């Protein structure tokens, strides 16, 4: 049914993948689809805090994310699937949408929000992805 599935995860938030990753894997297995796992380093360049961040710190954050994403995939990616990792930097929801387009994904699997924030049903990034993505979006409720 699907050819390429995008699973965006926040490496600092287990809840962004504990429920969503098994769903993405099951959907990829049943469709023989590629699974693309991405994480975004939020761009602080325009903010007051960001203007004090040295460029090297940003580059280091990207390198750290690559290492952590690789460790995540080594531990969690099943051998029977083609799984690829991607690190992006920028505005989270925009980078997710851009990656889905650039990689030719036809499904995005995304966790709804952090479970401790029960007041809303969809987090800010999940909501924007649902609203703006041209692909189907499978929201996994936390
Ligand atoms: P919350 O504020 O409750 O975490 P979000 O909308 O930010 O809500 O998060 C929902 C989902 O958005 C996460 O489960 C994850 O799939 C995606 N997401 C959030 N932050 C990132 C990030 N830095 N990189 C990749 N995906 C992210």
Image (cartoon, helix red, strand yellow):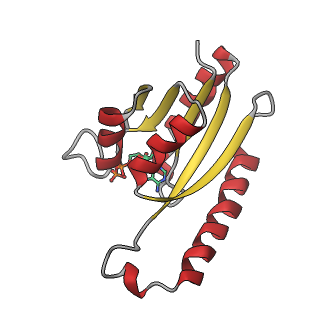
- Say above or below: 46 vs 39: below
Position of residue 123 measured from the top left corner of the image (x, y, whole percent)? 30, 46
**Count of numbered circles in the view:** 0
Give left or right: position of 48 versus 92.
left
Position of residue 24 measured from the top left corner of the image (x, y, whole percent)? 57, 30
Position of residue 17 measured from the top left corner of the image (x, y, whole percent)? 52, 44
Give left or right: position of 118 versus 70.
left
Q: Residue furthest right?
A: 79
At 61% from the left and 67% from the top, the residue drawn is: 62
At 53% from the left and 24% from the top, the residue drawn is: 106
- Say above or below: 21 vs 123: above
At 46% from the left and 84% from the top, the residue drawn is: 53
At 51% from the left and 26% from the top, the residue drawn is: 107
Tell me the quadrant of the picture where the N terminus can be found: top right
Please state which of residues 38 and 105 is positioned toward the viewer in this rendering: 105
Give left or right: position of 137 versus 79.
left
């Amino acid at each position: 049914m699907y050819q390429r599935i995008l699973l965006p995860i926040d490496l600092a938030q287990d809840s962004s993948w504990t429920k969503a990753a098994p769903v993405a894997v099951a959907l990829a297995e049943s469709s023989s689809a590629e699974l693309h796992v991405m994480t975004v380093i939020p761009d602080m360049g325009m903010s007051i805090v960001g203007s004090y961040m040295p460029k090297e710190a940003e580059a280091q954050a990207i390198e750290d994310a690559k290492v952590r994403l690789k460790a995540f995939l080594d531990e969690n990616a099943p051998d029977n699937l083609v799984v690829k990792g991607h690190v992006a930097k920028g505005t989270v929801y925009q980078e997710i949408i851009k990656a889905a387009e650039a990689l030719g994904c036809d499904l995005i699997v995304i966790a709804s929000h952090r479970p401790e924030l029960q007041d809303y049903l969809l987090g800010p990034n999940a909501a924007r992805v649902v609203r703006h993505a041209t692909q189907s979006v499978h929201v996994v409720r936390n």
